[in-house]
Amino acid sequence: MVLRTSELAYRYDSGQELSFPNLKSKKGQHLLITGKSGVGKTTLLHLLGGLSSVQSGQIWIREQEMSSMSKSQKDAFRGKHIGFIFQQASFIQSLNVLENVLASQYFGAKQVSATFAMGLLSELGIDQYAKKRTNELSGGERQRLAIARALSTKPDLVLADEPTSSLDDVNALKVLDLLVSEAEKNNATLVIVTHDNRLKSKFENHVEL
Amino acid sequence: MNLVKISLKNITSKPYPALLTLIMLTMGVALASMLVLVGGALDESFKKNIRGVDMVVGAKGSPLQLILSAVYQIDNPTGNIPLAEAELLAKNRLVESTIQLSYGDSYKGRRIIGTSHDYLDLYDAELLSGQFYQAPFEAVVGSIVADENELKVGDEFYSAHGADEGAETHDDHPFTVKGILKPSGSVLDKLILTKPESIWEVHSHEGDSAEKEITAMLVKFKNKMGMISLPRMVNQKTSMQAALPSIEVNRLFELFAIGISTLRIVALSVLFLGAVSIFVSMVNSLKDRVFELALIRSMGATRAQVFLMIMIEAFLLSVVGIVLGLLVSHTAIVALNDYASDQFGVSVSFLRVSASEWLIIGITLLLSLLAALLPAIRTVKIDVSKVLSSHVK
């Protein structure tokens, strides 16, 4: 199992409580989690990625229990095994397209391979922008760069938060196809949370919150 | 790709706030370094010239004037003293050695001193060419005097009465240049030395008194006892005056002290402002950068790495500020060098970083890092999940 959760629940500062269904995902078995806004999709994704601390319940990634790790162990684990894609693709402003991918490798995998990074960019069709500033890219290109960045550390798990909801139909499907095919090429398992119903038909493993 | 490279890109991608900080740091470092360099060189050159001189004896008058005229050759003499009385003092058991000085005449504004070879030894001066004078009206010329007037061994010149340029000349007794001194950084560079008899002979027609006179005598004591008893003895029991160079120089420096300490406060304030500027620009940019820092954390960066990144930015800024500041101050000093070395004998080498400057470098680095510490600590406390989920463009 790449991902497994048990009895996961979260209580917000406001007092509101959410409990999540148990999740399971084998290697290569992508998981789509859908739900209306406000049901805690992003919260769940941040819990899975170790960005916020588990309050009750348990998460195993690669059969390693997350809450048993120290903060810095969690940072290192996340860098090595998990890639993130956010709804609004954001980058380090001072770095160019290629450098953003390299920075992700540096912080995550602790080793940098420009060849691998350029390979990802060209497979995603944005290698010609390698030296450009990230704010010169279009919405679809930014999302593709986010995919390249997430896969740059060869993670086991890619957590994607509404990766297509900011894109139009044509771009959304293109980006989704690229995301799935690149993830499979790099042996990464996808977990996508979305309210975007356009994606439902594409995934067998589907959980509704 | 590494932290230093990312920090550097962060600075250069937003150059204007960085430029402001840099200007402040550069100005502060330049001011502070110029201050210690000029102050240090002035101090050094003053100390260099009183080395080996424990006491100066001359005609009664202002002790500061006596020291300035006899040691530094920058003021008029207080008058003359009888040679016999000076020689009697030289035989005192507390006196180790003495050097007699007779002066009052000049050549093109440079003073002619009647003295012995001991005066050269006092400043470890050596001959560049020629030899030491043997007879009256032979002269040894300091390096600056020789350069200015293009004097060579064998040249002749006439002395003028008084220390002012263009005064009445003694045109019946020409001096012959016998030797030229190597630059020693001491007062000798600006003097013309000759036998005391030359001075006496030039002036023999005026008054023509039987008693020989000298202008001042430099005294070295055998031990500390001399310091205690001799000045008082000279001042009370002879027609001469005794002055201690160390005391008079300290008095002189106290006169400068207010100006120097004011400048020091100004320099420190500018340095401090530079540090404040680092602090303000970092706190300001932090608001915009919180999301980016959270993003970096989501890529696997640890708190320590993000903290370090901010500190490296401050470090890089202050290093560049320090280098620029030192460049500015050393360039200014070198530009001032010709002028200053002529006036006071202040000379500073371009590439040497003095001990006080290392202190300034240390203070600047420390202030800059302290200024960055608070913003950097704030980055450690970022709630990554909250920042990332609150971000709506």
Image (spheres, coloured by chain):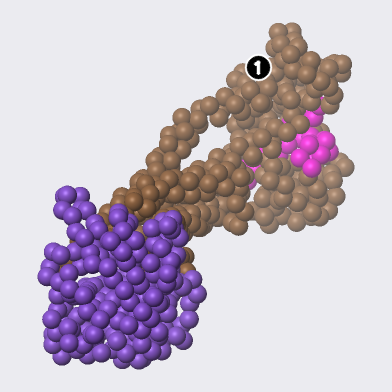
Chain colours: A purple, B brown
Q: Nearer the viewer, residue A26 or A125?
A: A26
Instruction: Tell me which residue sits at (49%, 71%) in the image.
Output: A110
Task: Answer yes or no: is residue A36 visible.
Answer: yes
Counting from the top left corner in percent of width and height, residue B221 is at 80, 22
Q: Is residue A156 magenta?
A: no
Query: Is B101 one of the magenta-colored residues?
Result: yes
* Residue lying at 79% horizontally and 42% vertically, measured from the top left: B124
Image quadrant where residue B168 sits = top right
Q: In front here: B228 or B280?
A: B280
Q: Which SS class for mark 1?
A: loop
Q: Nearer the viewer, residue B331 or B54?
A: B331
Residue B112 at x, y percent in the picture: 71, 39
Q: Which residue is mark 1?
A: B60
- Position of residue A209 in the picture relative to residue B249 (left or right): left
Please state if B237 lies on the left or on the right of B274 as rendered.
right
Query: Which span is picked out in magenta?
Result: B98-124
Split into 4 quadrants, where in the image is the C terminus of chain B?
bottom left
* Mark 1: amino acid: Lys
Check the image and report above or below for A207 versus B75: below
**Residue found 39% across the figure and 62% down from its top:** A66
